[in-house]
């Protein structure tokens, strides 16, 4: 925002920025955008000559000769007797709902109990937009935000070569419209129904930026990839790449969005149709393997004495780093990752009679499978870094729980 410094010494927004902020806030709360030649209730002036105004309303506008045009932001219904059309706007934000009163009170109490994260003076009530601090506190384990950026791969090539000799303005416009339908309509419906704690910073055209609890955001990325694949009728030439970063809620979105864009570029550079998270780039069909490992490790850590320890988790991370180096460089000194893991399991998770001490047989079998030399074992080793980080974040104690 641009403006002079106020009494506090901080820059104050100029009139144009204030208008943008006001209109942006109103857009997510209403259904109709009205462009008029006269000021209507809540209007924002956005042209000087001629002077036009933008207003938003929840109810359908009635006929008025001062209305230039109105847009339905939610569906394709038109307004009778008024020049109208539709322009779908992915403007979903999570709010405190009436059935979340107990959760809201718990959030405010937790906020007061800590000093480093969140503003102790922050207030919230039912109907308010949830703050980024509130979204971070919805996470499992560590209070972090997940920032997701994604876009369609090779879109320029799809437009230029996908239609070959049948390309026309109408066909190109239709393809562009259908892609926008996914990002502006289908995605919003998915988030509202399954991931309501997700903040849509933007979504439309062929890309998106979403903000939410870090663990939910990771799972949401896979749902989006699956839904996009279904939306394009599983066309292997139209795919999606994504990148996810995890951040404290106080870090400016202007900073985190740029950093997450760099993470997205790792997915692009690795061949596209991929996800990069926790420093690991995977194909979308490997997400289930990543999630399964993360859940197995998390569940075992939560078993305390009958599961793995945090110390073992950190050693497993070291073995994974050795394995990755060996796969990439064939360095003989890194080939000891399997003997190291075998020794660690024998010493710490086997009793005097050589019986396994891990109570979870699924994790025990998965760890044993890492000692093999086939392609399946390599796939597991490759996703293990992200799975270990995921489980480590998921089992961290919150600050107020450490007191």
Image (cartoon, grey):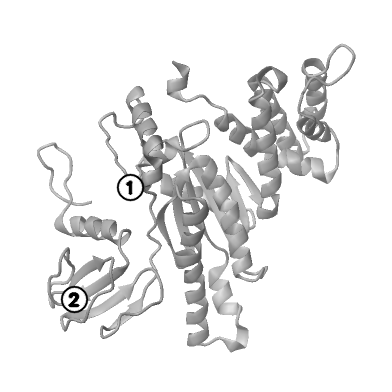
Assign a secondary structure to mark 2.
strand
Q: Is residue 161 visible?
A: yes
Viewed as shown, does residue 162 lie left or right of 40?
Answer: right
User: Which label was assigned to residue 129?
Assistant: 1
The residue at 65%/37% (across/down) is 387
> What whole-number distance in Å separates the C-alpha atoms at marks 2 and 1?
28 Å
Please rate how many residues cluster around mark 1, counting C-alpha atoms within 10 Å: few if below 14, some from 14 to 19, many from 20: some
Furthest-left residue in view? 7
Viewed as shown, does residue 338 lie left or right of 116?
Answer: right
Say above or below: 119 vs 40: above
Furthest-right residue in view? 353
Residue 57 in percent (x, y) is at: 25, 67
Please rate how many residues cluster around mark 2, counting C-alpha atoms within 10 Å: few if below 14, some from 14 to 19, many from 20: many
* Residue holding disc 2: 36
User: Which label was assigned to residue 5?
Assistant: none
Viewed as shown, does residue 137 lie left or right of 156?
Answer: left
First of labels 2, 1 by sequence position: 2
Q: Is residue 249 visible?
A: no
Give the quarter of the figure containing the C terminus: top left
Residue nearest the observer in this picture, 235 or 394: 394
The residue at 38%/77% (across/down) is 77
Viewed as shown, does residue 341 lie left or right of 162?
Answer: right
């Amino acid at each position: 925002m641009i403006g002079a410094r106020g009494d506090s010494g901080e820059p104050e927004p100029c009139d144009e920025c204030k208008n943008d902020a006001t209109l942006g806030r109103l857009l997510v709360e209403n259904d109709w955008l009205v462009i008029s030649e006269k000021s209507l209730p809540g209007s924002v002036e956005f042209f000087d000559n001629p002077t036009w105004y933008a207003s938003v309303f929840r109810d359908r506008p009635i006929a008025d000769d001062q209305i230039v045009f109105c847009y339905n932001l939610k569906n394709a219904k038109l307004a009778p007797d008024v020049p109208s059309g539709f322009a779908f706007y992915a403007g979903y934000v999570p709010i405190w709902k009436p059935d979340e009163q107990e959760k809201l009170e718990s959030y405010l109490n937790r906020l007061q109990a800590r000093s480093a994260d969140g503003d102790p003076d922050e207030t919230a009530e039912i109907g308010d937009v949830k703050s980024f601090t509130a979204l971070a506190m919805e996470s499992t384990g560590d209070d972090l935000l997940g920032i997701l950026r994604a876009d369609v791969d090779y879109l320029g090539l799809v437009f230029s070569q996908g239609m070959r000799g049948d390309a026309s303005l109408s066909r190109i416009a239709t393809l562009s419209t259908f892609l926008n339908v996914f990002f502006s309509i289908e995605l919003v419906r998915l988030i509202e129904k399954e991931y309501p704690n997700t903040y849509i910073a933007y979504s439309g055209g062929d890309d998106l930026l979403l903000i939410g609890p870090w663990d939910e955001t990771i799972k949401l990325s896979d749902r989006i990839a699956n839904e996009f694949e279904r939306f394009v009728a599983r066309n292997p030439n139209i795919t999606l790449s994504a990148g996810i970063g995890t951040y404290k809620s106080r870090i400016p979105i202007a900073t985190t969005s740029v950093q997450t864009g760099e993470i997205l570029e790792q997915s692009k550079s690795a061949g596209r149709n991929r996800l990069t998270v926790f420093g690991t780039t995977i194909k979308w069909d490997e997400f289930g393997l990543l999630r399964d490992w993360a859940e197995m490790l998390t569940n075992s850590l939560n078993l305390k004495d009958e599961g793995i320890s945090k110390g073992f988790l950190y050693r497993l991370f070291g073995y994974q780093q050795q394995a990755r180096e060996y796969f990439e460089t064939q360095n003989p000194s890194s080939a000891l990752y399997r003997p190291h893991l075998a020794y660690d399991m024998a010493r710490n998770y086997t009793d005097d009679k050589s019986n396994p001490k891990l109570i979870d047989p699924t994790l025990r079998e998965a760890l044993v499978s890492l000692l093999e030399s086939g392609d399946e074992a390599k796939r597991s080793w490759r996703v293990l870094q992200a799975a270990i980080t995921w489980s480590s974040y998921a089992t961290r104690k919150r600050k107020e729980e450490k007191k």
